Amino acid sequence: METAVGPDTVDVAMVVETMLGEHDLQSMAEFIELLRQRTGTQRSDADLKALILKKAAVLGVVVE
């Protein structure tokens, strides 16, 4: 069984940057859930976590 995920219609990376500036990160799971609600992305949790951690490092935001 092969699963294909189409391209995001929203710039998920830009939304992550915005969210990191707006919110105190409660937990990674909560952040990912809120990100999915805002963007409708179907990316895997692992992919989103990596993106969030990368953007947080660039912005100097501490993520636990």
Image: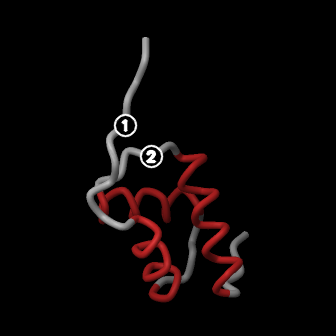
Image x and y of residue 54, in percent:
66, 69
Residue most extreme to the front: 7
Q: Quadrant of residue 8?
A: bottom left
Q: Are marks 2 and 1 in contact (CB under 8 Å)?
A: yes
Q: Which mark is residue 60?
A: none
Image x and y of residue 6, in percent:
32, 41
Name the side, left or right, on which 7 lies relative to 25.
left
Image x and y of residue 62, in percent:
71, 80
Q: Quadrant of residue 39?
A: bottom left
Observer-nearest of 33 and 16: 16
The quarter in which the N terminus is drawn is top left
Q: Residue at x 41, y 65 (%)?
A: 12
Marks 2 and 1, the one that precedes in the sequence: 1
Label 1: state its secondary structure. loop
The quarter in which the C terminus is drawn is bottom right
Q: Residues within 10 Å of mark 1 (few under 14, many from 20)?
A: few
Q: Residues within 10 Å of mark 2 (few under 14, many from 20)?
A: some
Front: mark 2 or 1: 1
Residue 46 higher or lower than 56, as above or below: above
Image x and y of residue 38, in percent:
30, 65
Q: Which mark is residue 5?
A: 1
Name the side, left or right, on which 19 lies relative to 39.
right
Label 2: state its secondary structure. loop
| Count of residue discs | 2
Q: Residue at x 57, y 49 (%)?
A: 47
Q: Which mark is residue 43?
A: 2
Q: Residue at x 60, y 56 (%)?
A: 49
The amino acid beneath tag 2 is Arg
